[in-house]
Amino acid sequence: MIHFKQNFKQQLTADDTKKIDEVFLNLKEEKDSDKIGYYKLYETSKKILKETKEYKKNNKYLKNKKIHNIVIIGIGGSTLGTKAVYELLKLKQKSSINIIFLENVDPLDISSKTKDIKKTNSLFVVISKSGSTIETISIFKYILEKFKLDLKKDNKRLIAITDKGSNLSKLATKNKIRQFNIPINVGGRFSVLSAVGVVPLVLAGYRVEKLLKGSKEFIESFFTQKEDHLLEKAYFYFKNKDTYSINTLFSYSTYFSYFNDWYVQLWGESLGKIDNLNTKVGLTPVGLVGSIDQHSFLQLIIQGIENKTVSFIQIKDFEKNIKIPKMNIDFLEKTDFVNGYNFDKLLNEECNATVESLIDENIATDVMVLDKLSENNIGILISYYEILTSAIGAFLSINTYDQPGVEFGKKKLVSKFN
C-alpha cells in the first residue's frame, strides 16, 4: 500500500476542472483504443510470463541450474527499468542468479563487468526495441567474440528481446535463438513491465506476478477515478511550468538510486518536446537519495532559485531491526539523542524534517509513503510515474511517446564514421 500526500495548494476554477477532465478522457482513449500499450501490460504480459516460465523449465542450462549470471545487453529503456526493479527486488528475495547490465560503450565499464563472466555459467540477453541500437549491437558483437559464442551452436545461451520483425528479430529467427517480442504500441522507456523486464526477472527467480498485480491495481484505480491526486499534481506542474521548471525526486533509500535513473529518462525523454504551438517545453528531472543528498543538494533547494518542486519516496517499515547503539563517546555527546532508536526511525524522521523544512519555505512538495518495500508497491510506483508522465504530456499538448531529438544525435554519429 502507498499513501500519497500533496503539500501544495491550487485553487481550481471551472476551466481548470474542465481541462483536467479532458486530459483524463484523453488518457482513457489512449488505453481503450490500444494506441498506447503500457496501460495494459499487466494483462498482455501474462502470456510472456507463462512463456518465460516454460522456457526456464525447458532450457537445459537453466534446468540443470548451471546458470549463475544473466547478462543483459541493452541501453536506456531496455535496461533502466529492469535495473531499478532488480535492485529493489533482490533486497526482498535471494536468488542464485545475478543480473549483470552491459549498457554503456565505456570500455572501462565493459572490461570490468565482463572480467569475471564465464560462458559456461551465463545466459546472454540482448535487448533492442528497434533491433539496431548502435551501442547495444556493438556490445553484442564484443560479447560474441570474447566468449566465442556461435549464433547457431550456442543459441540456447542467447535470448533476443525486440520488436517482431526487426533486424534483431530476423537474426534470432535465422539462428533459432529464443526471442520475446515487445508490443509495437509500447515505447522503450515505458516497457519495463513487458518482456524487457519480465523475462530476465523471471529467469532470475523473482515474483513478477506481484509486480503486475500492483500495476493492475493502480491503473484500474486511476481509471475508475480513485486517484484524482495524480491528475491534480500533473495539472499543478503544467500550470506552474514556467515557475517550477525542475522536478526533483528525493528517494529515502539508497536502493532507489536506479529507480531515480529510470524516472529521469522517462520524464526527460517524454516531456522535453516542441508543443503544438511550435514552442519548446519540458520539465527537468533530478533524482536524489536521502539522507545522502541532504548534505549535497538540499541547500540549493531551500535557499537557491525557487524553480523546483520536490517529490519524496519514503518507506515506513524497512523490516530491518538495526538499532543505533546506546553508546556514549567523549566529545560526541551531541549525537546521543538518537541512541537506541532504529536506523529506519532516523532515516524517516530525517525525511519528515526535510519535508517540513521545504513546506516552511513554501516549496511545493508531495510524499509517497510505502508501508513496506514489496513487489506490489514497486508495481504501483512504476504505473504511477508512467501515467503521471502521460498526463503532463497531454497537458503540454506534446507527443509524449516519441523522441525526435534523440534521432538527431544518431544521424550525427553515423556521419562521424563515414
Image: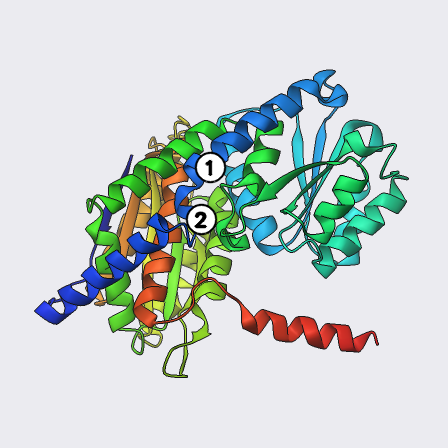
Residue 126: x, y in percent? 71, 44
Percent position (x, y) of residue 100? 68, 40
- Between marks 1 and 2, how big is the CA–CA gap? 9 Å
Tell me if mark 1 has few (under 14), some (14-19) or many (20+) residues whose alpha carbon lies within 10 angstroms of its own. Answer: some
Report whether 127 appears left or right of 122. left
- Circles 1, 2 touching at the beta carbon (< 8 Å): yes
Judge whether residue 108 can be spotted in this image. Answer: no
Q: Is residue 68 above or below residue 243?
A: above
Quadrant housing the C terminus: bottom right
Q: Quadrant of residue 412?
A: bottom right
Number of numbered discs visible in the structure rendering = 2
Name the kind of residue labelled 1 in the image. Thr
For residue 94, above or below residue 25: above
Residue 300 vertical position relative to residue 126 in the rendered view, above or below: below
Q: Which residue is disc 1 drawn over?
A: 44
Which residue is painted at 30% across and 46% down in the image? 368
Task: Report the colour scheme.
Answer: rainbow
In the rendering, at what x and y percent does residue 169 appear? 70, 46
Q: Which residue is mark 2?
A: 37
Q: Secondary structure at mark 2?
A: loop
Q: Is residue 269 above or below residue 165?
A: below
The amino acid beneath tag 2 is Gly
**Residue closest to the eye, 333 or 76:** 76
175 lies left or right of 39: right
Residue lying furthest bottom? 278
Residue 77 in the image: x percent, y percent?
56, 53
Q: Residue furthest left?
A: 14
Q: Residue at x 74, y 15 (%)?
A: 64
Indicate which disc, 1 or 2, sits on the residue closer to the N terminus.
2
Mark 2 Cα-neighbour bin, 10 Å: few <14, some 14–19, many ≥20: many
